[in-house]
Image (cartoon, rainbow, N blue to C red):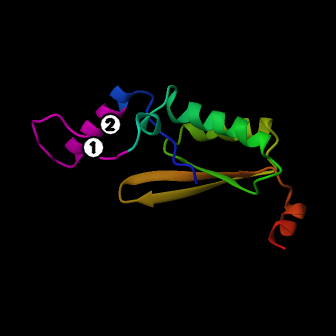
Amino acid sequence: MCNPPFHDSEESAMKGNIRKMKNLHQSKKSKPLLNFSGQQSELWCEGGELAFITKMIHESALFSTQVLWFTCLVSKKDNLNKLTNLLKKVKAAEVKTIDMAQGQKISRILAWTFIPQKDRKSWFI
């Protein structure tokens, strides 16, 4: 399961963190620290979540016969239509979207395969 960076810049990541802190009614005056860890390349990427997952979809097509299911978290619901349309263009055999909710956070799992249904059983023998 890929958990892509959904911010498009370090500044955007920091603003998102500040917003979260305000929503939690934390009133610290010091510079907020990010409430997640990782290398900068893991926290944000140019173009944000949509660009990252778009690249992942194109790369997944290169490995279409080697992986049964590709999965990725999608934070921004507005990205789903663009991503599912791209999956049609790259000829994914099946695409599934699974909604998830944890507290007030709503996200979804986007899953796709290039293996036709009739050929999937052979993966489990």
Label 2 Cα neighbours within 10 Å, binned few <14 / some 14-19 / many ≥20: some
- Taking depth in this image into account, of 35 and 19 the one nearest to the observer is 35
Residue shown at 29% from the left, 39% from the top: 17
Helix or strand or loop: what does disc 2 sit on? helix
Residue shown at 84% from the left, 74% from the top: 125
Percent coordinates x, y for residue 87 in the rendering: 73, 40
Percent coordinates x, y for residue 11 in the rendering: 33, 26
Tell me the amino acid under the disc marked 2.
Gly
Residue shown at 72% from the left, 35% from the top: 58
Viewer can see residue 85:
no
Residue at mark 2: 16
Helix or strand or loop: what does disc 1 sit on? helix
Percent coordinates x, y for residue 108 in the rendering: 54, 52
Name the residue at the right extreme: 118
- The quadrant of the rendering that contains the N terminus is bottom right
Image height of 122 relative to 70, above or below: below
Image height of 40 relative to 120, above or below: above
Q: Is residue 115 left or right of residue 24?
A: right
Tell me the amino acid under the disc marked 1.
Lys
- Taking depth in this image into account, of 82 and 1 the one nearest to the observer is 1
Dot 1 and dot 2 residues touching (CB under 8 Å): yes
Residue 21 shown in magenta: yes
Percent coordinates x, y for residue 77 in the rendering: 53, 42
Magenta extent = 13-37
Residue 77 shown in magenta: no
Name the residue at the bottom extreme: 125
Residue at mark 1: 20
